Amino acid sequence: MKDNFIDDIPEEVQTDISSFNEKEKLIGNLSQIFKALSDPTRIKIIYALMKGPLCVSDISELLGMSQSSISHQLALLRSQNLIKVKRRGRRAYYSLDDDHVLCIFKDGLEHAEHKL
């Protein structure tokens, strides 16, 4: 006879998981956020932006990469609402979109450091 372990899971937990599984748009958005954060260059950019707003030339110099490659990565991060841009005169300054991004990144960084 096969044991049915689902009977050991409280009904409210089962209901919560079922409800979450039906939120395809939310799950898709979350998946895209983690996908955007899966690139080493974008991780370096997010780390730099944790320190404060920077323009493309600043990020390019700090990371030792071309401005065009940085611009490409910034566009991807913007498309996922992980960063925002503010224009001051002719310059565009990038920063993290909000504290949620900072928390996601810091928690991921802390977890990665813990596993080293």
Image: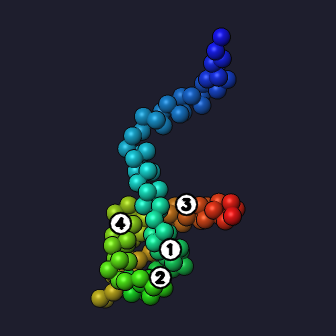
- Distance from disc 1 to disc 4, alpha carbons, whole Å, reads 14 Å
Question: In the picture, residue 67 is in which quadrant?
Answer: bottom left
Residue under label 4: 76
Residue under label 2: 63
Residue under label 1: 44
Residue under label 3: 104
Pointers 1 and 2 in contact (C-beta within 8 Å): yes
Q: Nearer the viewer, residue 52 or 35?
A: 35
Disc 3 or 2, which lies upstream in sequence?
2
- Distance from disc 1 to disc 2, alpha carbons, whole Å, reads 8 Å
Identify which amino acid the numbered label 1 is placed on: Lys
Query: Farthest top residue?
Result: 1
Q: Nearer the viewer, residue 70 or 100?
A: 70
Whether residue 82 appears in this view of the structure is yes
Identify which amino acid the numbered label 4 is placed on: Leu
Q: Is residue 11 above or below residue 31?
A: above
82 left or right of 116 in image: left
Query: How dense is the environment of label 3, judged by Cα within 10 Å: few (below 14), some, or many (20 and up)?
Result: few
Pointers 3 and 2 in contact (C-beta within 8 Å): no
